[in-house]
Amino acid sequence: MAAPEDPRRRRVGLLYDERMCRHATPDGEIHPENPDRIRAIWQKLESEGIPQRCIVLSAKEAEDKYIASVHTQRHVKLIKNISSKKFNSRRLRIASNFNSIYFNKGSSEAASLAAGSLIEVSEKVAKGDLDSAIAIVRPPGHHAEPDEAMGFCLFNNVAIAANFLLNERPELGIRKMLIVDWDVHHGNGTQNMFYKDPRVLFFSVHRFDFGSFYPARDDGSYCMIGEGPGAGYNINVPWEQGQCGDADYMAVWDHVLLPVAESYNPDIIMISAGFDAAVDDPLGGCCITPYGYSLMLKKLMGFAQGKIVMALEGGYNLKSIANSVLACAKVLLEEKPLVGSIEAQPLESTWRVIQEVCHELKTFWPALSVELPQKLLVSCRRPCSIELNLSSSSESTVENDEGASTTLCATNFVDIIEPLSKLNIDEDNHWKAVAPDHIPTKQSSVVLSEECPNAQALMPDKNVDGCTPWRSVLSETEVWYGSYGSNMWNPEFLCYIKGGKVEGMNEPCPGSRDKSSPKDVIWKTVPHRLFFARSLTCRWGKGGVAFLHPESNKNDKAYMCMYRITLEQFNDVLLQENSLHQENGRSQGAGTPLLVLSDIGVAAENKSLPLEALKAGCYSNILYLGEEDNLPILTMTCSCSEIDQFRSGELPVSGPSNGYMNTLVRGLVEGKQITREEAIAYINDAATREL
Ligand code: X5A
Ligand code: ZN
């Protein structure tokens, strides 16, 4: 006999359907958005006895007409048909026309089941048949645009269901709804679909990194507040960096989302619940714990009479997503009060972001006009992982008297960049990454150059008997390479040595032949003018890149991160820095080195040494900046004649792009030279002051 139903017991819908596992990469290629994600979640819930306590539902395909309420007919047709035989020969090519998309024979069905599942559970929650629900679906949806699949998303599941409730089931009384998108990526598709619609308050908190984090479009900024009647009903909270965790999300909940939800008073809440901001996610670089997710959810249950629909979006660490969904399921079942605590303080940048968002929206939401507690705004900085790491490896860290430079020995260099690189993986193909042998981590921002077809063409370092002779000579000579641009950020520079790419690079670098790490890294300031010029580079897209004025001036000061590397490696860096703009540097690099030992003497005498072979490149001029530990300090910049051309306007001068700016700031801040604010001011000054 069945136990009588406890009237206080919450009815929680739980939807899972194995058929959504049939969407997979066509040839079994490894991919983070894979069938194991939802299997892992389901297994975890089963092992904890969750399904027995929920109302378990299986998926239903969405009707075309409902999908077509937010997508174009053309897009519906394409996704519905992409798995049919007649697309066999075209499927791969069509997928490659989209950004971060694959298709196989199971894709059409899975996409339509994911959307249909959301319709199904949303309708039941709206009706009151369920109190709340979790739909464990894939493919995810929030990046999907009206006429475009992108970012692993085919149909916009949440948007389809939201539209269904508002327009197809008015009798259920859902007049206004709140969509909370806590996936680490911006929900660009959903934002777009309801941008002018005040019946949907779209709230997305995501990594933005000044516009360089996926999807790396400017519509994730806090300036995007909605339009026409929808003005004020779109709220973006764009993180400036990774590392955000429970404390940061709680601060945003308490100071932005909850006050707004309180005044908006939604009839239902849908959550675009990606779990890629979870601790240990390979793409997100943030660190929400399962306890953090349960608090975020619990705090939302106070609205809309607890009517909450959760839809899985991203989340790529199987353990993290399983534990996080489990924590959420327990909250919806409302078994016990939450236990846990948040140790960390919000990041300093979190308060800045919250202030910006509130400032932008306070005319629409008076609750956002309250001043943030003053104590939160001053010195609330929490140490980031690099600092923790440095202080724990005391014998490898030497602060000199001025406190200006930090010397790390070679082995620790790797230890120290490792936590940073962990936080910064957002390459479409990062999962193919192979960690360099001595980096003891499963995750690395460095993608080795295996996949870089031009690696050999760029540096055909072998003749019939192995190494070209010049290489062995130059590999014995050490120099300091002084970087003042994006190479100040260690993971970026390491790509020129190890090969591979970091976030923001279009192409992987081939690396140097000698892939050994720099023997030392120190910082210095030099009396040269930093400025930004040229307007477009392959690597960084639109915007200028950094140069040093070749002539020194005692009133100028530029920060410089110096790497102790071999002259062979310096040559390879030089080639890679210049090959972006010209083809002939490549063949040049093959047979003869660009810079040999005797050139250093010439450079030292004249302070600069223009290299004829690189004259078509951006950085064709070698600067000699003195010595450190009896080794020459070299860098590369433009020629003196180019300075005149920049001044006359013959060559363009322009400020750095967001992505480039972000990397410079990161380099300076993570290199512990200056604070984020000072770094931004330093770059802005260099970018705006006349040459
Ligand atoms: C749903 C989701 C991420 C796409 C990342 C592409 N998409 N690099 O998390
Ligand atoms: Zn995501």
Image: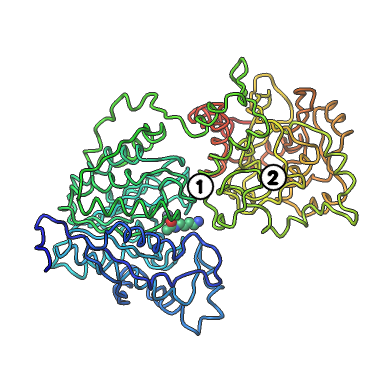
Q: Is residue 54 above or below residue 243?
A: below
Mark 2, mark 1: which one is toward the viewer?
2
Q: Residue at x 66, y 47 (%)?
A: 437
Q: Residue at x 23, y 53 (%)?
A: 332
First in residue order: circle 2 vs circle 1: 1
- The way the protein has been coloured in the rendering is rainbow
In the image, is 687 to the left or to the right of 334?
right
Residue at image mark 1: 212
In the image, is 560 to the left or to the right of 663?
right
Could you say where residue 139 lies in the image, as x and y percent from the top left? Answer: 41, 66
Instruction: Tell me the quarter of the picture where residue 159 sits.
Output: bottom left
Dot 2: element: helix
Residue at image mark 2: 496
State the residue lying farthest toward the top.
401
Under mark 1, the amino acid is Ser
Q: Is mark 1 within 8 Å of ligand 1?
A: no
In the image, is 257 to the left or to the right of 536?
left
Could you say where residue 61 lies in the image, as x and y percent from the top left? Answer: 32, 75
Indicate which quadrant contains ligand 2: bottom left
Q: Is residue 595 above or below residue 216?
A: above
Number of the label disc, if any, that sits on residue 473: none
Under mark 2, the amino acid is Tyr
Could you say where residue 24 lies in the image, as x and y percent from the top left? Answer: 48, 69
Mark 2–mark 1 distance (CA, rounded to whole Å): 20 Å
Packing grade of label 2 (10 A; few <14, some 14-19, many >=20) is many
Choose between 305 and 236: the one closer to the eye. 305
Could you say where residue 346 lies in the image, as x and y percent from the top left? Answer: 37, 34
Q: Is residue 347 above or below residue 6?
A: above
Choose between 537 and 3: the one closer to the eye. 3
Q: Residue at x 36, y 73 (%)?
A: 112
Dot 1: element: loop
